[in-house]
Image: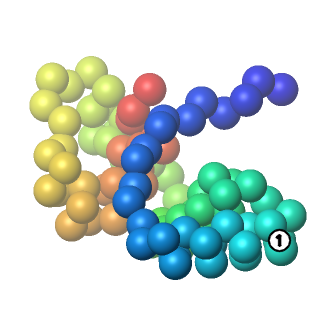
Amino acid sequence: MPATPRIQAIIRLKPELMARVKRTARKTGQSFNGYIETLLEKQTESQIPQLPSDFKVSESILKMKCCSSAPTQEMLDSDPKLAYLWEKYVQV
């Protein structure tokens, strides 16, 4: 199974916080990066709307693939359902 692509991000932390995070990561058996990724996943997963199992994607969403205009980042930030649908069904 190929590895999931990653994007490098640079963050700045206070030295004390960095030391605590590294210690906690070691205690959980994770790398610093893996631990931070786990924390971010848990923190943001609750923002993904829970859709019913019989949910059908509307034709207007599916047709967005061929549209020249995509929703703005502001629209996606203000509407978690649209952001979820856009990421899952429209973006390639």
User: Which quadrant is the C terminus positioned in?
Assistant: top left
Q: Is 75 drawn above or below residue 15 in the view shown?
A: above
**Image position of 62 (left or right of 30):** left
Where residue 75 sits: x, y (%)?
Answer: 17, 56
Where residue 89 sits: x, y (%)?
Answer: 45, 39
**Image position of 33 (left or right of 76):** right
How many dots with numbers?
Answer: 1
Where residue 88 sits: x, y (%)?
Answer: 48, 44
Q: Nearer the viewer, residue 12 or 2?
A: 12
User: Which quadrant is the N terminus positioned in?
Assistant: top right
For badge 1, the amino acid type reads Thr
Q: Nearer the viewer, residue 55 or 76?
A: 76
Where residue 36 sits: x, y (%)?
Answer: 59, 62
The residue at the point 86 percent across, 64 percent down is 29
Q: Nearer the viewer, residue 45 or 79?
A: 45
Q: Is 4 drawn above or below residue 13 in the view shown?
A: above
Label 1: how many residues lie within 10 Å, few (<14), some (14-19) or many (20+)?
few
The residue at the point 43 percent across, 44 percent down is 9
The residue at the point 48 percent across, 71 percent down is 15
Q: Is residue 50 visible?
A: no
Q: Is 16 drawn above or below residue 52 in the view shown?
A: below
The residue that disc 1 covers is 28
